[in-house]
Amino acid sequence: MKNKKELMDLSKKQELSIAVMNLISIEEHLAFTAMKTGKKEYLAALNSIREMRKKYLKKLLTNTEGELWCISKHLLSTTMRLMETGTKHFDNMKEAAEYFDAAFDAYTLFWLLQGLGKGNSNGNIKKTRETKK
């Protein structure tokens, strides 16, 4: 059983993970804005946001072996994009729910991969859908 401090730490990490997702999203928007406007100044802003994202992603990650730094970043990015796609499908709640389920799966996989770095796994990562049941 986790004590209160451990539960609070998880909550803090979850909040930070959502902040990192938003920083990744800002990076994407700044890149597209630079290309659409032709103003390279947006790339300087992108670099500042990127540095901030790297700083906070580093605080989240407990497992960076192999390619897990990049995989972790992409899992968070995927989570955010799937959630945003889900909100654009509220006219079809079944389809929206599919996107939210996929976002939850990506987010769960992010945390499972971090757990591998702490030796918290027996080496088997079951489908994330099964972990919710």
Image (tube, grey):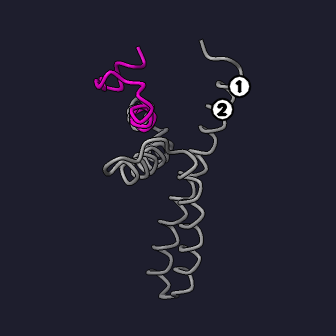
**From this viewpoint, which residue is outermost toward the front?**
119
From this view, report whether residue 133 is shown above or below residue 25: above
Three-letter code, disc 1: Lys
Residue 59 x %, y %: 58, 48
- Which numbered disc covers residue 5? 1
Residue 9's disc number: 2
Examine the rendered structure and indicate whether residue 11 appears above or below residue 54.
above
- Which numbered tag is attached to residue 98? none
The three-letter code of the residue at mark 2 reads Asp
Above or below: residue 94 compared with residue 133: below
Where on the picture, by quarter, is residue 114? top left
> How far separated are the C-alphas under marks 2 and 1?
6 Å
> 54 or 21, which lies in front?
54
- Residue 85 locus on image (x, y percent): 44, 47
> Residue at position x 32%, y 51% from top?
67
In which image quadrant can residue 100 be found? top left
Instruction: Name the residue: 53% across, 52% down.
Output: 57
In the depicted view, which residue is nearer to us: 99 or 130?
130
**Is 120 situated left or right of 4 in this image?**
left
Secondary structure, mark 2, is: helix
Quarter of the figure with residue 108? top left
At x 44%, y 50%, the residue is 81
Q: Position of residue 106 (x, y in %)?
A: 39, 38
In magenta, the rendered stretch is: 107-133
